[in-house]
Image (spheres, rainbow, N blue to C red):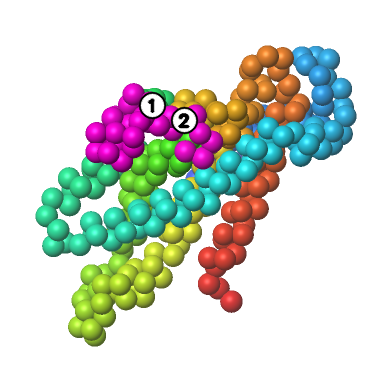
Amino acid sequence: MNKKKGLSMRQKQNATGWLFLVPAIVLICGFSIYPMISALITSFKTGTGTNMTFTGLTNYIRCFKDDVFIQSLKNCFFYLIIQVPVMLILALALASILNNPKIKARGFFRTAIFLPCATSLVAYAIIFRSLFATDGFINTIAVKLGILDSAYNFLANPLSAKIVIIIALVWRWTGYNMVFYLAGLQNIEYSVYEAAKIDGASAIQTFFKITVPLLKPTILMTAIMSTNGTLQLFDESMNLTHGGPGNASITMSHYIYNMSFKGVPNFGYTSAMSFIILIMVAILALVQMKVGDDRE
C-alpha cells in the first residue's frame, strides 16, 4: 500500500506566499486596476448616467480645443518649470548643510524644515491665502517698511497669484525632499569628504564633484515624484487662489474637479483629461529616467 505524499516544503512556502498575496491582489484589482480600465472606457463616451454613448476620440480632441484646459496645462508647466528646480536645489543645499556633523542642533533644524510637510494641505493653503491677502501679514509688513506704497492684491493678479502658489509649494515640500537627500547622504562615507579636503578641494568643488554625482539616483527619484505631484496639483489652486483670477492659476486637476462636480457632470470628458495627465506624467518620467541613466 502506497503512502499518500503530502506537500513538499517548497510547495507549502509557495502556498503560504500566495495566501498573503491574494487579498492584496484582489484589493489592487478592485480599487485600482478596475477603476482605471473603467475610466479609460468612459473617456471614449459622452453623455450622463446610463445614457452614455461611444463617440471615439471626441473627448480627447475636445481637450485641445478647450481654452480653459489649455490654460490649466500651461499653468501646471509654469509651476513645474519654476517650482521643482528651486525646491530640489534648496532641499539638496539644506541636506548638505545639515549633514555636517560639526553643526549643533542638527536634529532641531531638520525637524523644523520638515514640519511644513506634516501640515494639512487645506490648512496651509488657507494660511497662505490670509498671509497674502490685502490686509494680510505680507502687505502690512511691506507697507510699514516702505516697500509698497499701499496694499497690493497678490491674488487678483495672474502672475503674482501663480508666484504665491509657487512660494507655498516650496515652503511645504522642500523639507520632504530634504529628508530623501539626507538619507542618501548617510550612505556616503564621511572619509570621502575628508579625502577631498586633504586634496585641497573647496566646499563648492566637493558639492559638485562628490555630493551631486553620488546622490544622482535620489535626485532622479525626487525629480520624478515632484513632476508627478506638480502635474496633479489640486489643493493649492482650489483653496489658495480658487483658480483665479479668471482661471489664470487653475490647474488641470482643479479643472477636472469643476467639470465633474460643478454643474452638469461630464465624466467622459473628465476621464479623457485624466488620461492626458497620465500620459504626460509617464512621458516626463521616461525622459527623466533616460537623462539620468548613466549606463551605456
Whether residue 60 is situated above or below residue 213 in the rendered picture: above
Whole-percent x, y for residue 99 in the image: 23, 59
Magenta highlight range: 132-160
Residue type, label 2: Leu
Image point (23%, 43%), residue name: 111
Q: Which residue in the protein does label 2 denote?
A: 155
- Of residue 213 and residue 137, the one placed in the foreground of this image is 137
Instruction: Indicate yes or no whether the magenta region holds residue 168.
Output: no
Image point (87%, 27%), residue name: 54
- Mark before the other along the chain sequence, 1 or 2: 1
Circle 1 — which element? loop
- In contact (CB < 8 Å): disc 1 and disc 2: yes
Regarding residue 39, the answer to whether it shows in the image is: no
Image point (21%, 79%), residue name: 197
Circle 2 — which element? helix
- Of residue 80 and residue 100, the one placed in the foreground of this image is 80
Whole-percent x, y for residue 235 in the image: 48, 30
Image point (23%, 84%), residue name: 200
Alpha carbon separation for disc pair 1 and 2:
7 Å
Whole-percent x, y for residue 261 in the image: 63, 18
The quadrant holding residue 165 is top left
- Answer few, some or many: residues within 10 Å of disc 2's Cα (few below 14, many 20 plus, some between 14 and 19): many
Residue type, label 1: Ala
Q: Which residue in the protein does label 1 denote?
A: 133
Q: Quadrant of the C terminus?
A: bottom right
